[in-house]
Image: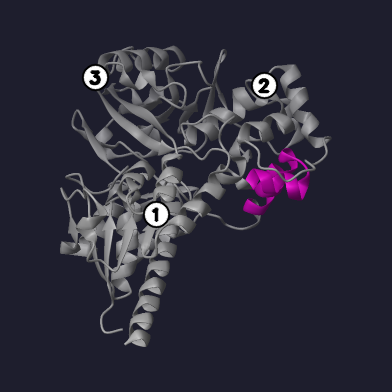
Amino acid sequence: MSRPGRVAVIGGGVAGLTTAYRLMNAGVDVTVREASGRLGGKLAQIQVGSLQLEAGADAFVARKPWAVDLCRQLGLGGELISPGENGAYLWTDAGLVPFAKDAPFGIPGDVGDVLRWPGLSRAGRGRALQDLLRGKRKNGEEETLGALLRRRLGDEATEMAVAPLLAGLYAGDVDRLSAEATFPELVAWEAAQGSLIRGSQAASRAARRGDPGPMFVKPRGGVSRLTEALAGSLGDRVMTDASVGSMDEVADADAVVLATPAFEAARLIRPRASDAAELLDGISYASTAVVFAVYPEGTADSLPPGTGFVVPRGEAPMTACTWISSKWPDPAFGARAVVRSYVGAVGDEDVVEAGDDELIQACARHLAAVVDLPERPEHAAVFRWRRAMPQYELGHLDRVRRIRKSLPAGIFVVGSAYDGVGIPDCVRAAGETAEQVVSHLAGAALDKETAG
């Protein structure tokens, strides 16, 4: 090749920045255009009183190595820290009850733990135990996460114990989410062990055999340090306040990476590939809000040991709550309890549009009912994420394959809408996308030389 090729990356979130970083290191002439005035996408911070708090993800899974490896490559390895507390609770009519310690995905792997499963009735626990006796599913048709859980563990265990944890990660509905696209581990458990309970037990044993280290980590100073470091490495290759009205604006690029929400990628690609645009528009999104509360000095010890709790659908205004001051201790917090509550999910998105004071009061009132906190925080704020959480519904994996197959040569998509919503998943997909772009550029250069 006479030159490495020019690539335009549209979107300055973690997926777009990581793709550009990988391309830059491969010697490619790359630029990033971000429509908003800031980088980071769903990694953002908010000022609450005197504190700067995470408005998006507050950590990433360490046992998926891609984000940790990227941090090390960027010189952030020495900054990675793990939570100060572990363990979470489930909201029940009897108050907060702890999840079993060895319960991957909230599913106990010990018969005794199933018999004592908090938040379930005796009948619900008995139904869950039938998972050990039921045969494997015969056909290989895709099913929803809810169908898998209900078939193995029953309705009560699904709705009151497991769904609050798993569906909450997607702000979704377990009866619409694809099991294979969201939690393929559970599908594999049934296939290998014939039971989700035995699968949980096997997973726990495997984890204990080695030294897996912490489940979650983040850079000191916040997850946004990752995108700051990426942007710093890319330098003037990154432009903010640089919206792209149409693909014609990047027509001089040899390849284009759309690292935007699926609906924005659909808008851009529609004039060139209507079939791909229609498929992209078929990926729906949920809107959510995060309600932050900072309580007065002396309240930190009111929080029970652990990191927070999740809530069964419809039982409280929030879907989950994180005790930030316990999970991520910081001298800036002093002796104050600092919490954030998550509001909104598929089918319950109207609540996101309620007023700030209404959301703050509702969350604070329900928190005070289960934890010894004042009914009103000292400082509070609300951050809304509109159309921010992609839904991996039935057919998602096939849809993504069809999208990529129908895209014109030289155009690529990457981001949380396709290959995983977590930060490590986006980092992994960005690396794979960069490799595909480099391969495309090399092929295009070879074709040009051959034609010449």
Residue labelled with disc 1: 414
Identify residue type, mark 2. Glu
Note whether residue 339 is visible: no
Q: Examine the structure image and report whether residue 191 is included in the region drawn in magenta.
A: yes
Exactly how many numbered labels are in the figure?
A: 3
Q: Earlier in the sequence, mark 2 or mark 3?
A: 2
Magenta span: 185-207
Q: Residue at x 75, y 31 (%)?
A: 112
Tell me residue 39's x, y (percent): 23, 49
Mark 2 Cα shell of 10 Å, populated few (<14), some (14-19), many (≥20): many
Tell me residue 245's x, y (percent): 21, 48
* Residue 48 image label: none
User: In the picture, which quadrant includes the N terminus?
Assistant: bottom left
Tell me residue 258's x, y (percent): 33, 54
Work out how far the residue at label 2 is from the one at label 3, CA to CA, in angstroms.
Answer: 38 Å
Judged from the image, the secondary structure of the residue bearing numbered disc 2 is helix
* Residue 156 image label: 2
Q: Nearer the viewer, mark 2 or mark 3?
A: 2
Main SS, magenta region, reads helix
Residue labelled with disc 3: 378
Q: Nearer the viewer, mark 1 or mark 2?
A: 1
Q: Earlier in the sequence, mark 1 or mark 2?
A: 2
Would you place residue 77 above or below residue 178 in this image?
Answer: below
Would you place residue 127 above or below residue 327 in this image?
Answer: above
Identify residue type, mark 3. Glu
Work out how far the residue at label 1 is from the one at label 2, CA to CA, in angstroms.
Answer: 37 Å
Q: Relative to residue 149, is residue 231 drawn left or right?
A: left
Q: Residue at x 56, y 36 (%)?
A: 177
Mark 3 vs 1: CB contact within 8 A = no
Tell me residue 188's x, y (percent): 68, 49
Judged from the image, the secondary structure of the residue bearing numbered disc 3 is loop
